[in-house]
Amino acid sequence: MLTLIQARRGSSRLPDKVSLDLVGRPLLVRQVERVQLAARAGHVAVITTTDPSDDVLADLCSQYGIEVFRGSALDLLDRHYQAALHFGETEAVVKIPSDCPLIDPAIIDKVLGVYEQTKGQYDFVSNLHPATYPDGNDVEVMTFAGLETAWREASRPLEREHTTPFFWENPERFRLANVTWETGLNYSMSHRFTIDYAADYEFIKAVYEALYPANPSFSLDDILTLLKQRPDIYALNADLAGVNWYRNHLDELKTVDAGNTKQL
């Protein structure tokens, strides 16, 4: 299994968000630490761009002993495919974005467990289509053969930029599975654990400062318990809950509607 964390410094809304401090280390490093706690994650690497602005990011990965691959800045589908070739992965590739520093390793293991326990039955397994977990626990795993097909055939800009829409937008072509939150709840539009704005950083920073010192491997349940005890932390980015990239492509997506996103 090859788990790839896509990262770059050039965010227009929150520049260099992956380098922001979380209890003494860069945000990206903290996320890699959490992903590495997942027993099924296998080979974990960061994939960034060949843009000179990401030289600093590549150096950061080297400093912390994190493997890094550099590829296309805008074609994320190509970056994932080329990284799989680079690392010699011919079976399955996992996609996790770098804006998920609170991701629960147990959720990663749950999604990858479904893929492994049903080996050969699915081309693509995720917990996003539809999403039920709090936003920021994004896990998508695809067969290398499926990734290669998408890389070869996907032509729309959103399919290249966001890597996986070619899978879940073509259910007649791919065998798809979705993992839902075992609680039966849906917090995908009400709880935001991802980072794209300054308010998100304040939220994530507050969670880390409250939980990390005593429990570096804190879980989703630990975060939810904290938010019940500290509604002031929940409120830091509550107005952004539900805001995601879908909002800009509703006229292009067949399997996503306005109920899966929120406009700013």
Image (cartoon, rainbow, N blue to C red):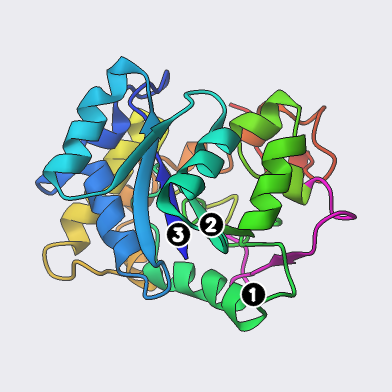
Tell me the kind of residue under disc 1. Gly
Q: Quadrant of residue 122?
A: bottom right
- Comparing 74 with 82, the one in front is 82
- Neighbor class of circle 2 (other Cα within 10 Å; few <14, some 14-19, many 20+) is many
Reply yes or no: does residue 158 show up in magenta.
no
- Comparing 69 with 226, the one in front is 69
1 vs 3, front mark:
3
In magenta, the rendered stretch is 169-187
Q: Secondary structure at mark 3?
A: strand
Q: Position of residue 16 (x, y in %)?
A: 29, 26
Residue found at the far bottom of this picture: 117
How many numbered badges does the structure rendering display?
Answer: 3
Q: Position of residue 89 (x, y in %)?
A: 49, 57
Identified at 46% across, 43% down, the residue is: 83
Give the quadrant of the C terminus.
top right
257 vs 103: above or below = above
Q: Position of residue 145 (x, y in %)?
A: 68, 56
- Comparing 80 with 107, the one in front is 80
Do residues under tags 1 and 3 come within 8 Å of each other at their CB atoms? no
Tell me the kind of residue under disc 3. Leu
Residue hosting label 1: 184
Do residues under tags 2 and 3 come within 8 Å of each other at their CB atoms? yes
Residue hosting label 3: 2
- Comparing 101 with 234, the one in front is 101
- Neighbor class of circle 1 (other Cα within 10 Å; few <14, some 14-19, many 20+) is few
Q: Quadrant of residue 230?
A: bottom left
* Left or right of 193 on screen, residue 21: left
Q: Which mark is residue 92?
A: none
Residue hosting label 2: 93
Tell me the kind of residue under disc 2. Val
Identified at 72% across, 37% down, the residue is: 152
